[in-house]
C-alpha cells in the first residue's frame, strides 16, 4: 500500500485513509494471504514500513501523522525502481491519495 500522509490529507481525510487501509488489510490480506505487508507513506519524502501481521499494521498505522508537502513524482519513481529490481507480477499496488501534488504543482484528481 502506498499511503499519502501529506498535509493536505490532515484531519478527517487522513483518518478515513487510515480506516480504509485497515479495512483493505483485514478483508484482502487476512489469514493465509498475509505474509508481509510493506507500506510506503509519502509526503515530500517516502517512509517505508513493513508489517508481519494485521495486528501490527493496525497498531502502527494509527500512529502515523499527516504533514508536509506532496511529491507524487517521487512515489511513481519509487514504484518504477521497485519494478525494475523485482518481478512486477508479484506486486500489487494500492495508492490512497487526494492526488494533490504540491511539489510538482500537478493535480491528478480534479
Image (spheres, rainbow, N blue to C red):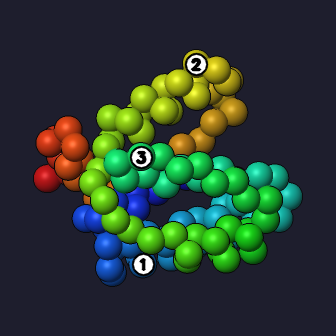
In three-dimensional space, the C-alpha distance between marks 2 and 1, rounded to whole angstroms, equals 33 Å
Q: Residue at x 64, y 71 (%)?
A: 60
Q: Residues within 10 Å of mark 2 (few under 14, many from 20)?
A: few
Residue 91: mark: none
| Towards the viewer: 95 or 82 | 82
Q: Is residue 106 above or below residue 37?
A: above
79 displayed left or right of 70: right
* Left or right relative to 58: residue 18: left
Q: Identify the image quadrant of residue 57.
A: bottom right
Horizontal side, residue 74 vs residue 3: left or right: left
Q: Give the image location of residue 30, x and y in percent.
A: 76, 65
Return the disc, 2 or 1, that comes first in the chain's sequence: 1
Examine the rendered structure and indicate whether residue 85 appears above or below residue 106. Answer: above
Q: Secondary structure at mark 2?
A: helix
Q: Quadrant of residue 108?
A: top left
In this rendering, the label closer to the viewer, 3 or 1: 3
Q: CA distance from mark 3 to mark 1?
A: 20 Å
Q: Which residue position is annotated with label 2?
A: 84
Q: Secondary structure at mark 3?
A: loop
Say which residue label 3 marks. Answer: 45
Residue 73 visible, this orientation = yes
Q: Nearer the viewer, mark 2 or mark 3?
A: 3
Q: Which mark is residue 15?
A: 1
Q: Work out whether residue 27 can be spotted.
A: no
Amino acid at each position: 500500500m502506498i499511503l499519502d500522509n501529506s498535509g493536505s490529507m490532515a484531519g478527517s481525510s487522513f483518518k478515513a485513509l487510515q480506516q480504509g487501509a485497515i479495512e483493505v488489510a483485514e478483508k484482502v490480506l487476512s489469514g493465509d494471504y498475509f505474509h508481509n505487508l510493506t507500506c510506503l507513506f509519502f509526503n515530500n519524502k517516502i517512509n517505508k514500513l513493513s508489517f508481519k501481521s494485521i495486528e501490527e499494521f493496525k497498531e502502527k498505522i494509527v500512529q502515523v501523522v499527516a504533514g508536509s508537502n506532496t511529491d507524487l513524482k517521487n512515489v511513481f519513481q519509487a514504484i518504477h525502481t521497485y519494478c525494475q529490481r523485482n518481478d512486477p507480477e508479484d506486486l500489487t499496488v494500492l495508492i490512497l491519495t487526494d492526488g494533490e501534488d504540491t511539489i510538482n504543482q500537478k493535480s491528478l484528481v480534479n
